[in-house]
């Protein structure tokens, strides 16, 4: 079983979905550590109650992105982490960190990448007038929201949608997609090779 850390900054609903999925018999990965850069992240309480080790690494305590990322890397290595899942982790990681963990670092983003990167994703989707949106799990590379795609799910965009309504519809799918993508990576059904996601037949 692969040892997984989940990195959060807030609510942690994707983290909860990963914890729930990983607790099922036969799941090829175990969530052993939850790390937040924000001390008040609500997700930390749930993780602690689920008996999972938690750690806060406040980014403000570090002088630079690189120093924060080295501290983060130290914690991950000390815990014997093999896969890192970013789940609402609202902090850009350095090129060094992305390269250090390449092929073992996943992110979930609430749009059909490469559309609508960054923040205010659902506002961007509604502004563009797309008729479908969705979510993407991808390998993290140094460029933001740009890594090779592992899995995507679509949802319809309805005429009366607000960013909040669309976000909730997408989030429901995120909670299914992220555990499925983590399972694929942990089982070796997908890997990062020459900058592409390669799937086992
Ligand atoms: C999720 O919708 C996730 O896709 C998004 O933040 C939300 C976190 O919710 N992530 C990003 O926008 C990253 N670029 P959660 O804390 O309840 O999982």
Image (cartoon, rainbow, N blue to C red):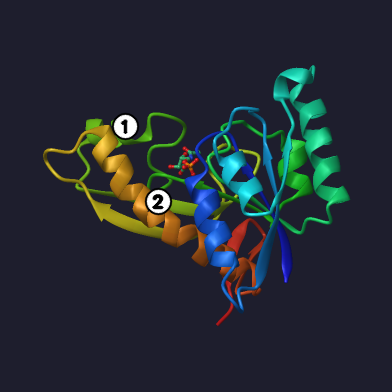
Expressed as whole percent of the image width and height from the top left, the position of residue 1 reads: 72, 72
Q: Residue at x 55, y 45 (%)?
A: 87
Tell me, yes or no, if residue 151 can be seen here. Answer: no
Around disc 1, counting alpha carbons within 10 Å, would you say few (fewer than 14), some (14 to 19), or many (20 or more)? some
Dot 2 falls on a residue whose secondary structure is strand
Determine which residue is flagged by label 1.
124
Q: Where is residue 197, by image quadrant?
A: bottom right
Up the image or down, 123 lies above or below 17; here it is above
From the Cβ of disc 2, is ligand 1 less than 8 Å away?
Answer: yes
Image point (61%, 31%), residue name: 91
Q: Position of residue 64 (x, y in %)?
A: 77, 20
Asked whether, in this view, residue 92 is left or right of residue 63, the answer is: left
Which residue position is annotated with label 2?
135
Corner quadrant of residue 62? top right
Q: Earlier in the sequence, mark 2 or mark 1?
A: 1
- Residue 191 seen anywhere in this rendered image of the structure: yes
Along the viewing direction, whichever of 68 and 42 lies nearer the viewer: 42
**Front one among 201 and 156:** 156
**Location of residue 95 with respect to 140 vertically, above or below:** above
Identify the residue shown where x is 62% and y is 31%.
92
Left or right of residue 120, residue 56 in this image: right
Give the image location of residue 180, x and y in percent: 50, 66
Q: Residue at x 64, y 74 (%)?
A: 187
Query: Looking at the image, which residue sits at the far front?
Result: 49
Position in image of residue 192 (x %, y %): 65, 61
Q: Quadrant of the C terminus?
A: bottom right
Near-viewer residue (175 or 11): 11
Q: Secondary structure at mark 1?
A: helix
């Amino acid at each position: 079983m692969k040892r997984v850390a989940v990195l959060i900054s807030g609510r942690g609903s994707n983290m909860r979905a990963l914890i729930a999925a990983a607790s099922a018999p036969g799941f090829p990965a175990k969530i052993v550590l939850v790390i937040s850069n924000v001390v008040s992240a609500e997700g930390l309480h749930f993780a602690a109650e689920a008996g999972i080790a938690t750690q806060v690494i406040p980014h403000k305590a570090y002088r630079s992105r690189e120093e924060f990322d080295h501290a983060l890397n130290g914690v991950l290595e000390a815990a014997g982490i093999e896969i890192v899942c970013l789940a609402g982790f609202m902090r850009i990681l350095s090129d060094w960190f992305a390269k250090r963990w390449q092929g073992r670092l996943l992110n979930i983003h609430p749009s059909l990448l490469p559309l609508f990167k960054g923040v205010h994703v659902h506002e961007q989707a509604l502004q563009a007038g797309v008729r479908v949106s969705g979510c993407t799990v991808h390998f993290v590379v140094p460029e933001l929201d740009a890594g090779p795609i592992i899995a995507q799910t679509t949802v319809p965009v309805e005429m009366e949608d607000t960013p909040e309504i669309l976000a909730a519809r997408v989030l429901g799918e995120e909670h299914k997609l992220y555990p499925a993508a983590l399972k694929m990576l942990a089982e070796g059904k997908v890997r990062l090779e020459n900058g592409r996601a390669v799937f086992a037949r």
